[in-house]
Amino acid sequence: VNFIEPDRWAIFLLIGAIILGKWKAFLRDWVPFVFLLFGFEFLRGIAGDRVATGELSREQHSGVHVQSLIDADRALFGGEIPATWLQDKLYVAGTAHWYDLLAVLVYGLHFVFPLVFAFMLWIGRKDRFWQFTIGLLVMSYLGFAGFLLYPAAPPWLAQQWGYIQDLHNPFDQAFKVLAPRRYDNFDTMTLWTLRSPNPVAAMPSLHAAYPWFVLLFALKFYGWRGSIFLVYNAMVWFSVVYLGHHWVIDILAGMVLATVCFLAIQVVWPRLERRIVNPASKPVRRLAT
């Protein structure tokens, strides 16, 4: 969804730094982080080398995990597959409801949400910014390792391969409402498959890991007020399952990954802080005076 791509939001954050009079500090602190984060997106393509660039076929990709994920979701939900169950209750062909549109918007905020949170930390205290961003990068690359070691098909691909039935494409339907008219004739699932570096990078779900990571840091830095981010997490869980992009087991794996990385950064941060932050932990606004 073009209007919420992360590179455009990075420009908005730069504009915010210019308004604060700290554009030089922004470039110094953010350029390495942004390059490493977007570099991760390009590297994800390596994990997809086993997947043909054209039409995906079940026979060609027997090494991709599918049935085990279906079995896990069925075991968690009494034999039901949450993605198909949700769509059976909510999806209406030819009608984009408010929750369809919301799901697509929330899904598109995958990178935007942690970037905005990092910016909030950056204009407050540099030590918090570095603690969060270093942890986010470590988590992202560990997720990349998971994609390499455990290629996993999302529900929409399991549907294409014939593992499950009755899964629809609310993403495409909602996208045609949100997108400019010149994109109306495009099949967005095909576009997403071609744009995504790796269509079998479902486990663990970084869509779930990122907002959970934000929630943990928000609770640490802001106490009970940080619990407001739990609402956004719930919206993400609904969106990725309803749209058919993740299994629930993917979400749980992403949350575990985020929790482990959060706890690990708490252990190593006292040592890193002395080398990275030094006295630069004062609020950006104070430094500007």
Image: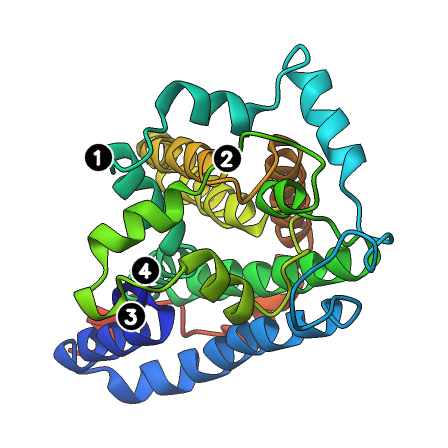
For the residue labelled by badge 3, is the local secondary structure a helix, a strand or a loop? helix
* Residue designated by label 3: 9
* Residue designated by label 4: 116
Amino acid type at image mark 2: Val
Q: Are marks 2 and 1 in contact (CB under 8 Å)?
A: no
Amino acid type at image mark 4: Val
Q: Residues within 10 Å of mark 3 (few under 14, many from 20)?
A: some
CA–CA distance in space, label 2 to label 4: 24 Å
Q: Residue at x 51, y 70 (%)?
A: 195
Front residue (pair 83, 239): 83
* Residue designated by label 1: 98
- Mark nearest the camera among 4 and 1 is 1
In which quadrant of the rendered image does the C terminus lie?
bottom left
- Mark nearest the camera among 4 and 3 is 3
Which comes before the other along the chain, label 4 or label 3?
A: 3
For the residue labelled by badge 1, is the local secondary structure a helix, a strand or a loop? helix
Left or right: 33 in relation to 73: left
Q: Are marks 4 and 3 in contact (CB under 8 Å)?
A: yes
Q: Residue at x 69, y 60 (%)?
A: 56
Front residue (pair 212, 62): 62
Left or right: 23 in relation to 122: left
Measured along the vertical axis of the image, is residue 213 above or below residue 72? Answer: below
Which comes before the other along the chain, label 2 or label 4?
A: 4
For the residue labelled by badge 4, is the local secondary structure a helix, a strand or a loop? helix
Left or right: 116 in relation to 42: left
**Residue 196: where, in percent of width, then height?**
55, 66
**Residue 139: where, in percent of width, then height?**
63, 57
CA–CA distance in space, label 1 to label 3: 24 Å
Q: Which quadrant of the view contains residue 163? A: top right
* Residue designated by label 2: 241
Which comes before the other along the chain, label 1 or label 3?
A: 3
